[in-house]
Amino acid sequence: MTTLKEKNEAHIFTITTELDPPKSASPAVTEEQVVKVAPYVDAVNIADCPMAKLRMSPIALSSIIQHKYQVESIFHLTCRDRNVIGLQAELLGAYAMGVHNILTLTGDPPSIGDHPEAKGVFEVDSTGLIEIARSLNEGHDLTGHALGVPTDFYIGTTANPGTDDLDKEIRRLEGKKKAGAQFIQTQPIYDIRQAEDFLAAAKGLDLPILFGIVPLKSFKMANYLNDKVPGIFIPSPVLHAMEKGGRETGLKISRELVEGLKEIGAAGAHVMPVNDVDAVKYIAEGLR
């Protein structure tokens, strides 16, 4: 099986998607979703207790997905719940289980989740976590002591093409690349020109960029994202289209964006279906 890393290095357009783990001791719900999306994607992201809400371990679930369905996983790892010893232990275990793609995240504070009294750790941030993963790849722990066997993680980070200060975002990414980041998955875009501008600004980074795609389900959703979520810009033509249409219009817009990303030479697209896994087939079929 050609890995996501190998595809990115070969400049093959890739599509990933994101699924939430279940709040359950059974992976069955997510497995059903994987069966639906696997034919259309190159890898499946598995979130780490998103929005600080208790869910199954993304490492365990990623391992199950890879072994049972032969589709690569990208496990999220946050700095919220573990100190540097715990983070390193998780990474060593993940690698031993065959899960080699990681998306590094600082993580949401426990106060917004379903265990608001829990204590956040945040001993390092996402850049510190990248450094930890790079250290393990180099064959030593964070203190410089040698490992018996090194890891070989493909280390991902996040970016926001819609930020108000693009120069600052690129400087932040430069720091993350220096720390060891190897690929980028972004927040959602709704304007292909925004992706073009970001690609131009980030050209010097020489990192594969997979642009986020969140399908719009309604005009209400489009308005909310445009007005309330920092860093998301939805152009007027898209808002007007959603005012007249619904889910099908949103899917069509998302597919056109993915087609546009392929045309402008982006490394790929990261489809976040927001509990609508059937959208992945419509958006991604035939575009990998």
Image (tube, rainbow, N blue to C red):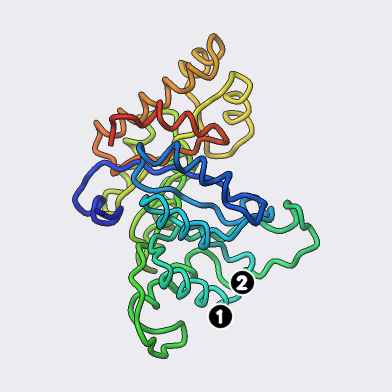
Q: In the orientation shown, which residue stands out farthest toward the left?
A: 10
Q: Residue furthest top?
A: 244
Instruction: Please tell me in which quadrant of the rendered image residue 141 appears.
Output: bottom left
Label 1 sits on what residue type?
A: Ile
Q: Split into 4 quadrants, where in the image is the N terminus?
A: bottom left
* Image quadrant containing the C terminus: top left
Q: Is residue 264 above or below residue 176?
A: above
- SS of the residue under disc 2: loop
Q: Is residue 3 visible?
A: yes
Q: Decide which of 169, 11 is in the foreground and name it.
A: 11
Quadrant of the image occupied by residue 115: bottom right
x and y, in percent, of residue 138 in the image = 33, 79
Which residue is rendered at x = 61% and y = 53% of the image? 26
Does residue 175 appear anywhere in the picture? no
Q: Is residue 15 left or right of residue 164?
A: left
Up-down relation of residue 39 to residue 21 (above or below): above
Q: Mark 2 highlights which residue?
A: 82
Q: Is residue 68 left or right of residue 86?
A: left
How packed mark 1 is, by other alpha carbons closer than 10 Å (few <14, some 14-19, many 20 or more), is: few
Q: Are marks 2 and 1 in contact (CB under 8 Å)?
A: yes
Q: Which amino acid type corresponds to the residue marked 2 in the rendered image? A: Arg
Which residue is located at x 56 percent, y 23 percent?
Answer: 217
**Residue 166 appears at what percent x and percent y?**
42, 45
Write down the residue under mark 1.
Answer: 85
Residue lying furthest bottom in this view?
A: 145
Residue drawn at x 56%, y 62% is 78
Q: CA distance from mark 2 to mark 1?
A: 8 Å
Secondary structure type for disc 1: helix
Q: Is residue 192 above or below residue 67?
A: above
Binning the other alpha carbons within 10 Å of mark 2 as few (below 14), some (14 to 19) or many (20 upward) gives some
Residue 271: where, in percent of width, then height? 44, 38
